[in-house]
Amino acid sequence: MTNTKKFSKNDGGFICVNCKKEVKPLKYTSRNHCPHCLFSLHLDINPGDRKNLCGGILKPVMSEPSPALAKGYAIIFECEKCGKKTKNKSAIDDNKNLLIKLTNPENCIK
């Protein structure tokens, strides 16, 4: 039995709940978080499905370089409503200074 992730492309634009900036569609995969402040919403059970009923704000608490992502980062989020921690890959247009800042444990958002 294989454990494969289910992925649904869901690449709509939105207004960020944290910084209130307009976020345009990514065009090459599903947009998961704001590229400006990296915040997200706890909406997915499987990537892009928008079936999670929590709906809490996902705060980026840290990031880590990901060799598997070829110069990309993995962003670790914590839901402010239910406390669940999730991980997602960074997008090409993400705020690189913030990604790098969040790799230092002293800068991680509490």
Image (cartoon, grey):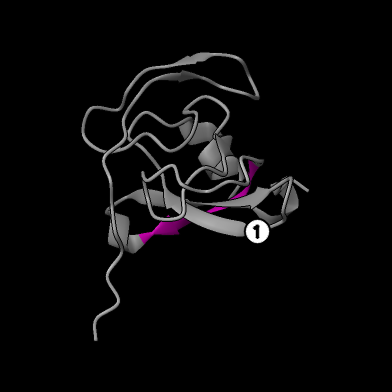
Number of residues whose C-alpha sits closer than 10 Å to that of mark 1, classed few (under 14), some (14–19) or many (20 or more) = few
Residue found farthest to the left = 28
Please tell me which residue is depicted at 52% across the width and 24% down the height of the picture.
Answer: 36
Q: Amino acid at mark 1?
A: Lys
Q: Residue furthest bottom?
A: 1
Residue at (78, 48) in percent of width and height: 110
Q: Residue furthest right?
A: 110
Q: Secondary structure at mark 1?
A: loop
Q: Does 26 appear above or below 47?
A: above
Closer to us: 37 or 85 = 85
Query: In the image shown, does 92 or 88 lie closer to the viewer?
Result: 88
Determine the main secondary structure of the stretch shown in magenta. Answer: strand
Q: Is residue 32 left or right of residue 36?
A: left
The magenta stretch spans which residues? 58-66
Tally of marks: 1
Residue placed under numbered mark 1 in the picture: 84
The residue under the point 44% across, 51% down is 88
| x then y, percent, for residue 53 | 58, 46
Q: Residue 13, how many percent across, how many down?
A: 39, 20
Q: Quadrant location of the N terminus?
A: bottom left
Q: Which residue does the image show at 37% across and 18% down from the upper left? A: 24
Instruction: Tell whether 28 sits left or right of 97.
Output: left
Residue 109 location (% of width, % of height)? 73, 45
Q: Is residue 46 magenta?
A: no
In the displayed structure, 108 sits above or below 30; it is below
Does the segment drawn in magenta span residue 60?
A: yes
